[in-house]
Amino acid sequence: MPRVSNIELLKQNEQPTLVIRVRTKVENLPCLIAESYGKLCAYMEELGEIVSDLPFVAYHNMDMQDLDVEIGFPVANPLPGKGDIKPGTIPEGTRIFCMYRGPYEEMAPIYEEMQKWMYENGYASAGPVYENYYNGTDFPAHELLTRIVMMVRKA
């Protein structure tokens, strides 16, 4: 059974990013994420830059057959893009987050729990959902650690 820690509320400043934004089916996502992180890391090395926080995927919708996602890294300062790599930002604002440990394919109940928390606490969705990855697929599925972040506003 997936495990979630408490859902917490926080406010964050705008965060510059470097991203690759694509549309894809959910079954293609793992390969696309790995490929995109590889491109982003090579470009950051070319620039002589390093990331400033955990890698992420931002979900602009939840249509599993036509996902609109940004795959990227937070960076300390705005950086130029190159080809399909674009500068971006994680917007300033209020959000809720929780830590999840377990297989990616078992995250749906966590999303439902977070939606319920929003409703019960007078918040509504206000933007993309971010998943930050603390470790990767080289770990056993039951040890995968993900921070799920939802942009919110008072309803």
Image (cartoon, grey):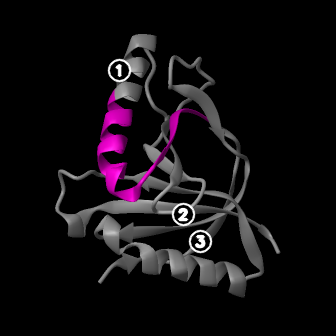
Q: Residue at x 50, y 25 (%)?
A: 84
- Return the residue found at the far front: 65
Question: Mark 1 falls on what kind of element?
Answer: helix
Q: Residue at x 48, y 37 (%)?
A: 73
Q: Residues within 10 Å of mark 1 (few under 14, many from 20)?
A: few
Query: Seen in the image, is 99 located left or right of residue 97?
Result: left
- Residue, disc 1: 42
- Residue 69 in the image: state x and y as whole percent: 52, 48
First in sequence, mark 3 or 1: give its number.
Answer: 3
Disc 3 is placed on an element classified as: strand
- Return the residue at label 2: 62
Q: Residue at x 41, y 27 (%)?
A: 40
Q: Position of residue 31 (x, y in %)?
A: 29, 44
Between disc 3 and disc 2, the foreground one is 2
Residue type at tag 3: Glu
Please state which amino acid type lies under the numbered disc 1: Ala
Nearer the observer, 41 or 53: 41
Find disc 3 in the rendering and name its residue.
Answer: 8
* Residue 102 place in picture, x, y as percent: 29, 70
Q: State left or right for residue 82 relative to residue 32.
A: right
